[in-house]
Each structure stands twice: as C-alpha cells, then as structure tokens.
Image (spheres, helix red, strand yellow):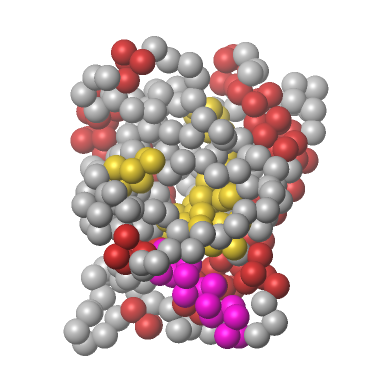
Amino acid sequence: MLVLRPFIRQVVFRAARPHFIATPRYSSTLAEDVRSDSTFRIPLIDFAAYKQATSLADKRRIADDIVNGFKEVGFVYLTGHVIEPETVNHSAEFFRLPEETKARLAWDDPKANRGYVQVGRERVTTSMDAAEIAVLRAKAPDTKESMEIGRENHPTFSNKWPQETEVPRFKKTMLHFFQTCHEVHTMVMKSIALGLDLPEDFFDNKIDRQDHSLRLLSYPPIRTSLLLGDGQARAASHTDYGTLILLFQDSIGGLEVQNPHTKHYQPASPIPGTIVVNAGDLLARWSNDVLRSTLHRSLPTCTSTSNPSRYPPLTMEQYIVGRLAATYS
C-alpha cells in the first residue's frame, strides 16, 4: 500500500513542476556519511534511469541505491516524475471550504480510513497503546487537518467527496492522482524486490488491489508560541504504518528525519521536482528490519538462522486498522 496509507501512504502537500536535477557525486559512501550529523544526507536518486533501463544490470544498479537508502536512512529523494499542478490547486481549494462543509465528510471508521479529519483529532506517535495516545492527544494534539481518500471501487467502503459545485473537478483530479501514485509505487516496489535479491515482480500480486490511502494535508497558520510547549508539533515524531510513503513537499518544507545512527533530527529540505519516499512499518516488518521505518518529527532473503524473524505473522489489515483506531479520537 501506498500512503497513499496501507501500501503507500501518500502525504500530499504541494508539488512543484519537475525540472532536470543533476545527481551529486560523493567521495564517501552513504553508510559513512550517515554516521555523522555533519555529513548526514538523504540520497537523491534518478528513478527515470530505472524506468528507462534496457538491461537487468542497469536496473540493479538503481535498485541497489534505493535499497541502500532505505537500509541506512529509511528515506530517499526520487526524481523523474511529473506531478500535475492541478492536484495542488484542488487540495488547497478543498481545505478552504467552510468547516461545516468539511465536517459533513468526517472520517468515522478506521477500516474505511476515508474522509475529513479536523485539526486536533489525530495524534501520531510511535505508541500503539490507545489509552496512552489519548493522553498525548489531549495534551498536545497535532495541529493539522487532512482528507483521506482510498480506492474508488472498494466493495465495502466509499470515498467521501465534496459536491462538484463546491470544488469542481476535485474527485476526477484526485482519482487520477491516486492512479499515478499507484503506478509509481508499483515501480519502486519492483526496484526494492531486485535490491533484495528477489524476482522483480515479487510484490506485484501483493499490491495490485490498490488498497492505498491518498492523504491530503494542510497545516493552518498557528502562533509559534503554541508549538513551544512540551510535546507540541505540527505532527509529532512517528513512523508511518504502510509499506511506502510518497511525500510531495511544498517550498516551505518543515519535514525532519531522525538520523538512525545519532538519533538527532535533520531537515529533509524540499528539492523541487522530487518525491520524498520513505519505508513504512510494514516494509520494515516484511524485510525483518533490513529496511528502516525511520522516525520523522519477513521476506525470504531477509531471514536466516543467524537473523531469525523478529515479528509474528500479521495481515496488513490487522496492523493498519489497529494503528488507525488508536491514533484518532
């Protein structure tokens, strides 16, 4: 799933029109650089080279870079994608709707995970204890609002759409964007499979239902003093629940990633024309923690006699629904 949110969760801020970005060259390896905060970096990878590769060897070179990024940092920047500005415009238009209009579309079911989430209702955290999360939410709720969108043809759950007259073309734009993100997700998962010494199509039949969550996020203006209290943040430190998360930042930024080696937070500054991609909890579980689900403010090739499975069997639905039910009020 994407976040999109089960396999990819998509967190959508504002996307910039891509342009050519030169991939930097480093004299040291990523593994060496991330050991120090002064040289910490999130790798920048030209994913167009993977899609255009004419040989398995060329694909494997890009795949190794992606998997290495997830092993060492848990995050990568990917270039080589076109994200339509219309998506950004419609997201902003939705959040400008009156509160009573958005409230009609309120999120109400963790299994469905669809609808509008008002400011203060969510409290992301690494905790999985509902009572503990409730205390954190009462003390320091996340100062953001969101709109959650799932696949349109689900047999049980329906998306919650504003009226066409309220935000013209919103539904059409978001469903097109959902499909675009699914296609990116599928290609990235193929590269991860290769980088883990698996067949390139290993994940194909595990993500083809498109049980993703497309998440639009808005961070309303707030006084700086309100963010200085204990535990206060726009979105508190957390890992993401799904397999992959595609994040489209605006020019303002604000995302910080914990260096897994020093435990200090470092800015993931916006780079126009890139998608920030991070591994989620489920991908970490699938890979037996070979791939990192990193804080930000078991596959067959990943287990062995010396590195036995760290997690019991668990379905995606069990994990995702449990986390969502505890996160929201």
Relative to 183, is 299 on the left or the right? Answer: left
Residue 61 among magenta residues: yes
Q: Who's the residue at 67% across and 34% down the image?
A: 88
The image shows residue 317, relative to residue 223, as above or below, that is below
Identify the magenta region.
Answer: 56-69
Judged from this view, the residue extending furthest toward the front is 27
Which of the 4 image quadrants contains residue 89? top right
Q: Who's the residue at 29% across and 42% down the image?
A: 265
Where is residue 300 shown, x and y percent of the image? 38, 82
Residue 314 among magenta residues: no
Q: Who's the residue at 24% across and 19% down the image?
A: 229
The image shows residue 59, relative to residue 110, as above or below, that is below
Which of the 4 image quadrants contains residue 197? bottom left
Q: Who's the residue at 63% across and 60% down the image?
A: 184
Quadrant location of the C terminus in the rendered image: top left
Q: How many marks?
A: 0
- Helix, strand or loop for the magenta stretch, by majority: helix
Where is residue 183 shown, x and y percent of the image? 66, 61
Nearest to the observer: residue 30 or residue 96: 30
Relative to 60, is 55 on the left or the right? Answer: right
